[in-house]
Image (cartoon, rainbow, N blue to C red):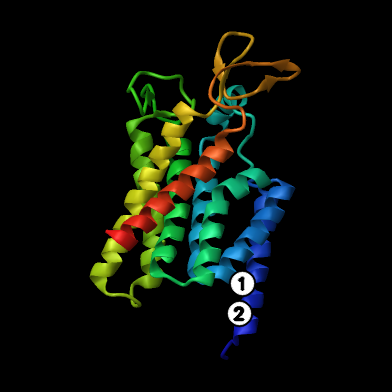
């Protein structure tokens, strides 16, 4: 039996809906997060086809797996430091997929190969950052600042470990691997190697930019016990901001870093 295009699209849309429902039931997404994820994923599929869809699903499913890994061990630290838990809301969905969707729409309107790669870079950044956060936080080593290499409190943005950096590189490489699956027979081998290298390198660079922004502009607070946290308030008690800008939270950092890295990759592929 040969499937026509309309039937394939219906099957893809139904599959995306099923995945979003399962993600909501598994508490990987909030209800609104699942709704936004559905429409964002549909937008990527319409703009770039099955390869964009596979990259986004690869990011979401792998990141969700690592989020749930040793979840009980992370829970206490997350409650003390972060406003949001492991189930992603609609803002987090937009922060992690928004840049990729913008680039995918640009690719749909102006189908350049550089934009195709840049879209994968945007997803690779988010995947690299997610793997680094979820795996790096399990490291027994003391995190250090990516800017001045001084020790920082575990779990605070801008702090990295060697395990986290390795996980970040692997996360970017994972998205490059998805790219290679779809492009292996479509482009020359050397061009494929160049593109996969670009996705991996700029995915890792984007995660590093995320950490730098975490140090320079992301807000940090001191709670009533004198401990650093990224939570604006603890119940009805408002924590004192000691650095950063209130509007430049973790979600904004994720969006900006992925867009910056994708833009850098596009520039390199186009002009260098």
Residue 192 in view here: yes
Where residue 60 appears, x then y in whole percent? 54, 52
Any mark on residue 210, and which? none
Where residue 236 appears, x then y in whole percent? 76, 17
Where is 97 relative to 237, above or below?
Answer: below
Q: CA distance from mark 2 to mark 1?
A: 6 Å
Considering every residue shown, the one lying at the far left of the view is 190
Quarter of the image where the C terminus is located: bottom left
Any mark on residue 12, and which? 1
Q: Nearer the viewer, residue 191 or 144?
A: 191
Which of the 4 quarters of the picture holds residue 205?
A: top left
Where residue 64 appears, x then y in whole percent? 55, 47
Residue 57 in view here: no
Considering every residue shown, the one lying at the far front of the view is 271
Q: Which residue is mark 2?
A: 8
Residue in the picture at 27% in, 62% down: 194
Considering every residue shown, the one lying at the far top of the view is 225
Q: Nearer the viewer, residue 9 or 266?
A: 266
Residue in the picture at 33% in, 72% down: 184
Mark 2 Cα shell of 10 Å, populated few (<14), some (14-19), many (≥20): few
Residue in the picture at 32% in, 50% down: 201
Kindly indicate whether the residue at mark 1 contacts the one at mark 2 (C-beta within 8 angstroms): yes
């Amino acid at each position: 039996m040969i499937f026509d295009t309309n039937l394939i699209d219906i099957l893809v849309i139904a599959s995306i809906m099923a995945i979003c429902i399962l993600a909501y039931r598994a508490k990987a997404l909030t209800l609104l997060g699942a709704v936004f994820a559905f429409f964002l994923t549909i937008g990527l599929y319409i703009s770039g086809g099955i390869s964009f869809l596979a990259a986004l699903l690869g990011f979401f499913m792998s990141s969700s797996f690592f989020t749930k890994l040793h979840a009980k061990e992370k829970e206490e630290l997350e409650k003390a430091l972060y406003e949001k838990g492991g189930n992603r809301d609609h803002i987090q969905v937009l922060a992690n997929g928004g840049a990729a969707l913008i680039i995918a729409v640009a690719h749909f309107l102006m189908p350049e190969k550089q934009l195709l790669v840049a879209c994968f870079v945007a997803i690779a950044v988010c995947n690299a950052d997610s793997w680094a956060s979820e795996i790096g936080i399990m490291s027994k080593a003391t995190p250090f600042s990516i800017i001045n290499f001084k020790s920082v409190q575990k779990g605070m943005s801008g702090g990295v470990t060697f395990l986290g950096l390795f996980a970040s590189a692997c996360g970017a490489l994972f998205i490059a691997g998805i790219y290679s699956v779809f492009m292996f027979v479509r482009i020359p081998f050397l061009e494929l190697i160049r593109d996969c290298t670009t996705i991996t390198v700029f995915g890792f660079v984007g995660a590093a930019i995320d950490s730098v922004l975490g140090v320079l502009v992301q807000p940090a607070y001191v709670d009533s016990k004198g401990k650093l946290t990224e939570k604006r308030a603890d119940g009805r008690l408002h924590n004192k901001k000691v650095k950063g800008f209130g509007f430049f939270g973790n979600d904004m950092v994720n969006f900006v870093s992925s867009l910056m890295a994708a833009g850098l990759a596009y520039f390199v592929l186009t002009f260098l």
